[in-house]
Amino acid sequence: MQIEPECFTIEDYLHHTFSCECGRFHHTDVEKILISQGALERVPEAVEELGYHHVFLVSDYNTYQAAGERVEKLLRDRNQACTSYVIPRKIVVPDEHTLGELLVHFNPECDLIIGVGTGTINDMCKFLSYQMKMEYMIIASAPSMDGFASVGAALIVNNLKTTYNAHVPKAIIGDVDILAKAPMNMIAAGVADILGKYTCLCDWHLSNLVNGEYFCPVIERMVRYSLKKMMEQVKNLKERTPETIQTVMESLVLTGIAMSFVGNSRPASGCEHHMSHYWEMKFLFEGRPAVLHGTKVGVGTMTAIRLYQKFMESEIDYEEAVRRAEAFDFAEWSENMKRTYGAAADGVIANEKTEQKNDPEEVKKRLVVIREKMGDIRRTVNDLVPKEAFVKGILEDLDAPVNPLELGIDCGMVSDSIEVAKEVRDRYTLLQLLWDLGILKTAAEETAASFQKEIEK
């Protein structure tokens, strides 16, 4: 069976193994997706159909009120065993402390974990259930991010934002009536997370051109279709119609299925996400309130588009790029990681010792390929990256931030994030390309200054 993104409903991706033109087979272990009005009422039915008997229900202060309390009542009214734990905080950090807290309150009689929430709750329930060799379900409280159906769990461990291998949920529940009541900034964050696909897909193409990284055109079509469907509804978003909210949620879930087909977040996460992760860690270290993931990704997308434009305008001096690569000083680089990453620096430095993506010989090898394929690279960027004004207009219509300084990210942190966020992941993106070409630092400083100038107007 072949994947046909333009013809499939979201349920068509379930219960099949697809033979793909990329040479691989694609499959997801998600068994049930319910995105509709009144879907919450069907949770007990889904638990029974999937054969579970005792639920460990996880929510936080906000999501318990939005949906968790109702789910608990529905399960108990159906005489289904339920152990409920409400994390007693409005802001939850997905770190070792919170995971330990969930483990302490876990009832060993439970055979299914159900998370009620979005990014943080989903990631923690995903990871906890995977480590305990159990299954989990997620009930979305807002259409705010695209990780519901992905295999990775993004956690902060040893102060470093890291994505761990885990598994997909057995079921994804999105009650449109509840999703429509989510704060508008959370709905806008979901849209912004999808907008990030413009730059992340271009990054994926870059890595395929430069490194020969695996690339699947069918999965790219899936992600682009989710982007297209959302764009058809975005003008109606503030009206919160059932059709609009359902489309946004399905777009987010479809992107997650695309990630599960690949086995990692590559189809949905590029340099715009890496800058977002860096800002998240810095805010955490400084004790500042967290910003929604999708909101940061939207601003990261604006930043990435501006950097892509700088790349397109740059005249490349390959000899100078080689000299810069050969002048790489690991000790000096490590000191910069300590300055910028603080408590997370040891993990970043350890990663580089293993990955060696900044090693002069590796950079020089890539420069040979980059020089040979620069025409293809520039054509790809020209074809795939939208104009800044296009994305900016969508975000502004939703009253979403478009400039990192609007989030309290000062000019110095913007510059640092562009320069060092690539160290968060062993993944080739525009940021590593600019590093290889020897122009990353200049691009970082100029881009940060441009955002500062706009704020000052």
Image (cartoon, grey):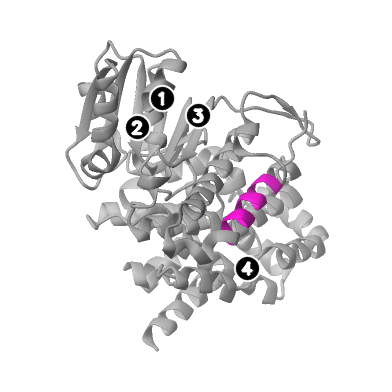
Q: Where, quadrant-wise, is the N terminus in this rendering? A: top right
Q: CA distance from mark 1 to mark 3?
A: 8 Å
> Which disc number belongs to residue 168?
3
Tag 3 or tag 2, which sits nearer the N-term? 2
How far from the left and from the top, in percent, is residue 274? Answer: 49, 53
Tag 4 or tag 3, which sits nearer the N-term? 3
Label 1 close to label 2 by CB (< 8 Å):
yes
Front-most of residues 11 and 27: 11
Q: CA distance from mark 1 to mark 2?
A: 7 Å
Front-most of residues 188 and 32: 32
- Say which quarter of the image contains residue 93: top left
> Which disc number belongs to residue 308?
4
Crowd band around label 3 with a 10 angstrom C-alpha radius: few (<14), some (14–19), many (20+) = many
Q: CA distance from mark 2 to mark 4?
A: 38 Å
- Residue at the spot 69% in from the left edge and 24% down from the top edge: 17
Q: Where, quadrant-wise, is the C terminus in this rendering? A: bottom left
Tag 2 or tag 1, which sits nearer the N-term? 2
- The residue segment tinted magenta is 221-231
Q: Which residue is mark 1?
A: 136
Q: Which residue is mark 2?
A: 115
